[in-house]
Image (tube, rainbow, N blue to C red):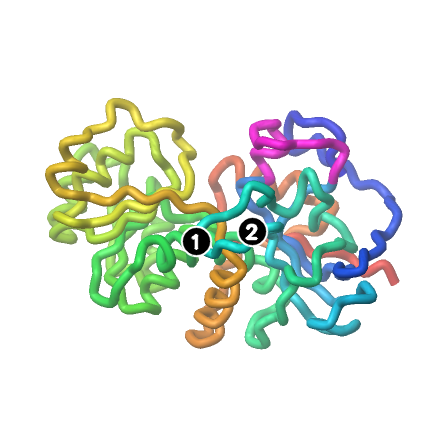
Amino acid sequence: MLRETGSPDSLKLENVDMPKPGSKEVVVRLKTAALNRRDLLVIHGQYPGIKLPAIPGSDGAGEIVEIGEKVQNVLIGDEVIINPGLNWGGNLNTKGADFTVLGVPTNGTYAQYVRVPAENVYFKPSHLSWEEAAALPLAGLTAYRALITRGQVKRGETVLIPGVGGGVATFLVQFAAALGAEVYVTSSNEEKIEKAKGLGAAGGVNYTSEDWVKEMDRLTGGIDLSVDSIGGEVFNNLLSLGKIGSRVVSFGATRGPVPHLVLPSMTVKEISVIGSTMGSPQDFVNMIKLVEEHKIHPVLDKTYSLEEAADALLRMEKGENFGKLVLSIPDDK
C-alpha cells in the first residue's frame, strides 16, 4: 500500500479486504506482478492524478476467482493477463478523456487480489510462464503501438531503439526483429548492447562515446524509424540520423524536454514526429497475436517477492535491469 509519496521505501505491506466485483468486473488472484517506470513516477509524486492511499502496480497475471453477474467472456479458474489501460474509449486511433492506467488511483497489482473490468482480462498465452505473462502487458502494449500502430514499421527498414535495457525497449527489439526490420540500439553499457544482439539486434553503439552519432550513421547508413523514450538532447541526434521521409515515435522523455530543437533537420528531411501512449484494446489483442505467432518470450531481469517490491523499484531506479522486474505473489491458502 502507498499512503504517501517519497521513495520506494514509502511502500508498506498491509492487510486489506478482498475486493468484490461489480456486475461487469472480475477479481483476479494474482500469481505474479511486474514493475514499470510509471510505478516509480507515482511513488515519487511525479505522475498526474495521484490519489492516496492506493495499491500501485499495472501489470499482473493470475486466475479468475470471482466474476460479476454480467460477465460472459471468462469463467472462474481461467488463467489471464490484465490489460492495464482502462477506459480507452470508442476511437481506436486516440484514447478518450477518461483513459487511465491500473494502479493509482485505482488499486493495482502489488497485491494478492485485484479487481478489474472484465473487458480488460485476456487469456494467458500458453507458452509463457507466470513471470513472463506478468511482464508482457504494459510494456508489450506500449512497444506494439509505438512500433507498429504509430510507427508503421516495415520489413527491411532500419530501426533505432535508444537506451536499450528497460522493458519497453527490449520488446521493441524483439518485435522489430520478428517483423524483419534491421534493429540497432544504443546504451552506456556494452553488456546491454550484446544482450540486445542476442534478442535480434544487428548492432549497437555506446552513447558515452563522443562520436556515437557519427558511428551510428556509418553503421546504419541512416535510420528509417527511431522509437524513443529518452527525449532531452538525444532527440536532436535522432533527427540527425533520420533518412529523408523517416519517422520518430516518442513515447516518453526520461531526460526531459528537448533543448534547442533543430527544426531544419526535421523540415528539410521531412521527418514525421509522432507521439504514442500505451495502446487501444485492439492493439492489445494484436500484440498478443504477435507474441503467440512468433513465440516471443519477455525478457526477465530478476524476480522478487512481493515483500521485496521496494528493492525491485530501487534496482529499476538505478537503471541496473535489462528486461522486466517481476514480483512473485504469495498464495493466501
Q: Which residue is depicted at the point 24% across and 45% down?
A: 272
Is 199 one of the magenta-colored residues?
Answer: no
Which quadrant does the N terminus fall into?
Answer: top right
**Front-most of 105 and 300?**
105
- Precedes in sequence: disc 1 or disc 2: 2
* Residue 195 visible somewhere in the drawing: no
Look at label 2 and name its amino acid.
Trp
**Front-most of 187 and 125?**
125
Q: Is residue 254 left or right of residue 50?
A: left
On residue 93, which mark appears? 1
| Helix, strand or loop status at disc 1 | loop
For label 2, the residue is 88
Gap in angstroms between the C-alphas marked 1 and 2? 10 Å
Q: Which residues are magenta?
A: 39-54
Query: Residue 87: percent from the left, percent from the top?
Result: 61, 50
Q: Which residue is depicted at the point 74% across and 45% down?
A: 307
